[in-house]
Amino acid sequence: MAFAGEVPVTVHAARVSASGVSAAPAASGRGGLLPALATRMEQATIQDACVTSTARLPVVGAVTAVVRIERASASGLTVETGKATARSVKLSGAKFGTPQGSLQRPTGLFTVGAQKVSGTTVTTQPHAFTAGTITSRGVTIEVHQGEGGCERGAAR
């Protein structure tokens, strides 16, 4: 499964946990102009999530899709995002790496990672994601005219 788009998507989740996490700087697929962080998770679980996306259509105006998910899990998940926030984050087995092409010409990139990461009240605006598999339970979808529907704290 993969997603990439020009219409902004916001994901709110009450709880996120992951194992086998690594993150490195990237550039958004939008012409490579926007800085992003590409985060890879071997296994991830999301609880009480709410996803919104508002498109502005000719004549109709703003139309918002709201997807609520009680629980989702993914394997091989990579998320490219320019912004993510969380009320609290816990991690174990943290690591930091600076890969080099050669000793004379370092790449300048870095990778951070952890064996396990968990966060509460997580919000992100992904530019793109890919996953080997995603399964979900308790999914409801609503489409309405106008904006809003998944404000902070609205995730069940």
Image: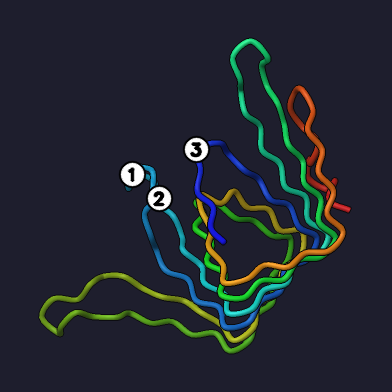
Position of residue 72 measured from the top left corner of the image (x, y, whole percent): 76, 66
Rounded to the nearest angstrom, the CA distance separating label 2 from label 1 is 7 Å
Question: Which residue occupies the foreground of this view, 7 or 132?
Answer: 132
Rounded to the nearest angstrom, the CA distance separating label 3 from label 1 is 14 Å
Q: Quadrant of residue 7?
A: top right
Residue drawn 32% across and 48% down? 32
Q: Is residue 47 above or below residue 9?
A: below
Q: Residues within 10 Å of mark 3 (few under 14, many from 20)?
A: few
Q: Which numbered tag is attached to residue 33?
A: 1
Residue at the spot of label 3: 6
> Mark 2 or 3 closer to N-term?
3
Residue drawn 78% across and 56% down? 49
> Helix, strand, or loop for circle 3?
loop
> Mark 2 or 1 closer to N-term?
2
Residue drawn 26% across and 70% down? 108
Question: Which quadrant of the rendered structure holds the N terminus?
Answer: bottom right
> Helix, strand, or loop for circle 2?
loop
Position of residue 92 measured from the top left corner of the image (x, y, whole percent): 63, 86
Residue type at mark 2: give it: Ser
In the image, taking residue 3 as reference, residue 9 lies left or right, namely: right
Q: Quadrant of residue 105?
A: bottom left
Q: Nearer the viewer, mark 3 or mark 1?
A: 3
Residue type at mark 3: give it: Glu
Q: Which numbered tag is attached to residue 28?
A: 2
Position of residue 113 measured from the top left corner of the image (x, y, whole percent): 51, 79
